[in-house]
Image (cartoon, coloured by chain):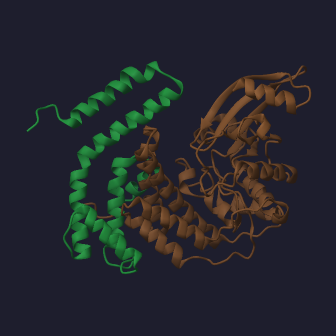
Chain colours: A brown, B green
Amino acid sequence: MEALLARCVMSRFSGATGVIDAVRLSGGASQETWSFDIVYPARNIGAILRRAPQGYGAAPARAAGLNVEAVLMQHAYEAGVPSPRVLHVLHPQDELGTGFIMERVEGETIPRKILRDDEFAEARPKLARQLGQVLAIVHGLDLLQLPALRRMTAGREIAELEQDYRSFNWPRPVFELALRWLRDNDPGPSREVTLVHGDFRHGNLIIGPHGIRAVLDWELAHSGDPMEDLGWICVNSWRFGEIDKPVGGFGTREELFAGYETAGRSVYPERVRFWEVMGTLRWGVMCCGMMQRFRAGPEHSIERAMIGRRASETEIDLLRLLAPRHHALNMSR
Amino acid sequence: MQDEPTPEELIKAVADFLRAEIAPQISGHLAFKLRVSINALDLVTRQFAQAQAGDAAEAARLTGLLDMQGTLGELNRALARRIAEGNADLQTPGLADHLWQTTMDKLAVDQPNYAAYKRELEKKGE
């Protein structure tokens, strides 16, 4: 791998003499992430390769595709979204598959560290507002300048979730209740259709001591209702125990909305709430999907198996959203 | 009849051994996978202890709600269908309480440290 990367950077980046410290960070069924340093005579530059090697499994139908991701990141970077600079989009001659090389941004993505470590104490109270501002830039990008994207609506999202859920063939009355609620409360087409990041949450945000440093992973980007991104980051699953701070466990909706509005954009809180319910169900369905993949093999991953047993977390979250109770049940049986 | 120790006792002994003796010896990604594995064994221990009573109570509630007999799987399928078809909802007497109780029993096995679950447990009577 290091040899292939070295050949690629020496032919694409003038002055580069090779690469060092190539390590694979993560790998899924359809793509891999590698970290390495590009060696220059003066100083090295940290880089990340995101790629789908040849012969790898097909990307999920929802995926925008790595080439599209690279273009979106470039546009986001130029518009002022904290984002790594895209350095090179892979060509077939690189023999590295499809994908791109970007700058490596230093910082933290692990939620528990971001929410608890002293290093981020100064960043935490600012983050919700900052993220509102960042989302406003993302939603302000001109769709006409971007590659063709999957167009999503609330109705289509409900239908896809229902299809996934039914394919598991495992009855979940709470999910049924959520599907009914979503259909009954579908706010209809949004006034404005914009770029939607699609997975704007912990893990895809690099945080530094002063706040947001980079937005990553545009794999699920599409066009649709901008309020979807605001709802998704409020899903309880991304609060990591800090359940009274709805935005990622570090901030309030009011701060998120205020940041968004300073950029001259409007927030529709009812739509945000709708997408929060949708997002909670979506994560629940994704947990069930992990269980399916565990069963199907060939990787007998205990992590995936255990994520399957986290679907019930989204059931209690859905009940807290849709059927809140103010006192305890009579726990006797 | 199988002999003792029981599966519960064996699994708990394995989990305790991994936690006390093995976990301190390893690091990195393997340590993470070990932690997840120990969590899985703890979950199984909780399920052994709690599932029987929880399932029986769930089946009894469902039998009453749906006015039908069946296995727990059949009853849950029937309830899911009724909600999907609009023949049961949060206004249906007993439904919300049933879903809450069932979900609380699941969390007690799956993720008893989940913050939302702990918050709901703290809610005492009026």
Classify residue A7 by image quadrant. Answer: top right
If the image is split into quadrants, where does the N terminus of chain A sit?
top right
Q: Position of residue A172 (x, y in %)?
A: 38, 63
Classify residue A83 by image quadrant. Answer: top right
Q: Is residue B26 above or below residue A225?
A: above
Instruction: From the viewer's perspective, tell me whether residue A21 is left or right of residue A18.
Output: left
Instruction: From the viewer's perspective, tell me whether residue A253 is left or right of residue B14.
Output: right
Depth check, front residue: A270 or A304: A304
Q: Position of residue A137 (x, y in %)?
A: 81, 58
Asked if residue B38 can be seen in this view, the reply is: yes
Depth check, front residue: A289 or B120: A289
Q: Position of residue A263 (x, y in %)?
A: 83, 62
- The residue sitting at 66% across, 27% down in the picture is A23
Asked if residue B116 can be seen in this view, the reply is: no
- The residue sitting at 50% across, 62% down in the picture is A281
Numbered-mark total: 0
Instruction: From the viewer's perspective, tell me whether residue B10 is left or right of residue A289.
Output: left
- The residue sitting at 36% across, 73% down in the picture is B81
Q: Is residue A105 above or below residue A186?
A: above
Depth check, front residue: A279 or A40: A40
If the image is split into quadrants, where does the C terminus of chain A sit?
bottom left
